[in-house]
Amino acid sequence: MKKIVFAILLGSTSIWGWAQNVLDSASVKPSTHFTTTEIDYGAIPQNSNGERVFEFTNTDSKPLILTNVVASCGCTATEWPREPIKPGERGTITVRYNTSTIGTFRKSIRVFTNSNTEPVLLIIKGEVKPSNPESNQTKTKNS
């Protein structure tokens, strides 16, 4: 009987510890605050400037290190600070979308840091329109 009671107490203690860990992790605030996590380019001409900037602030009490920034495809290049961002300081991530391809786009950029277990997801979207629609229509008609 003592073994059963001991097993029940041990099991309930383990469950309580697990539940407390889940509650604690749910209350953790992200250490990085982005001004925006989505940039809409709108309609832009083909071969135009595809560079945009995401701004963020380190809201934690310890230095923030961006360990990796990964774009969803090769059509998007990124630049980010390699040095630690001190508490309260701001940083930027520059994104360059290749605007040579006509059509709509929606791309994601995942930002990995030393303080968040999950990456921050940034989105760019828009539509690249032909630079000179009349010349493209003429080419299509003559083809």
Image (tube, helix red, strand yellow):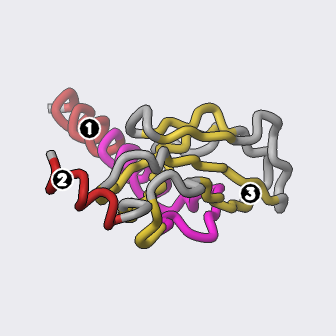
Q: Which mark is residue 58?
A: 3
Mark 2–mark 3 distance (CA, rounded to whole Å):
51 Å
Sequence-first disc among 1 and 2: 1
Residue contact at pointers 2 and 3, CB within 8 angstroms:
no
The reply to whether the C-beta atoms of the residues labelled 1 and 2 are less than 8 Å apart is no
Residue 29 lies in what quarter of the image?
bottom right
The quadrant where residue 132 appears: bottom left
Circle 3: element type: strand
Look at 69% across and 41% down and name the residue there.
80
Q: Residues within 10 Å of mark 1 (few under 14, many from 20)?
A: few
Tell me how far mark 1 sits from mark 2, CA to CA: 72 Å
Which residue in the structure is indicated by mark 1? 11
Amino acid type, callout 1: Gly
The x, y position of residue 48, in whole percent, is 55, 57
Residue extent of the magenta highlight: 14-40
The residue that mark 2 highlights is 140
**Figure check: 124 above or below 114:** below
Q: Amino acid at mark 3?
A: Asn
Q: Secondary structure at mark 2?
A: helix
Secondary structure category for the residue under label 1: helix
Give the numbered dot on residue 127. none
Give coordinates of residue 61: x percent, y percent: 79, 55
Number of numbered discs present? 3
81 on left or right of 3: right
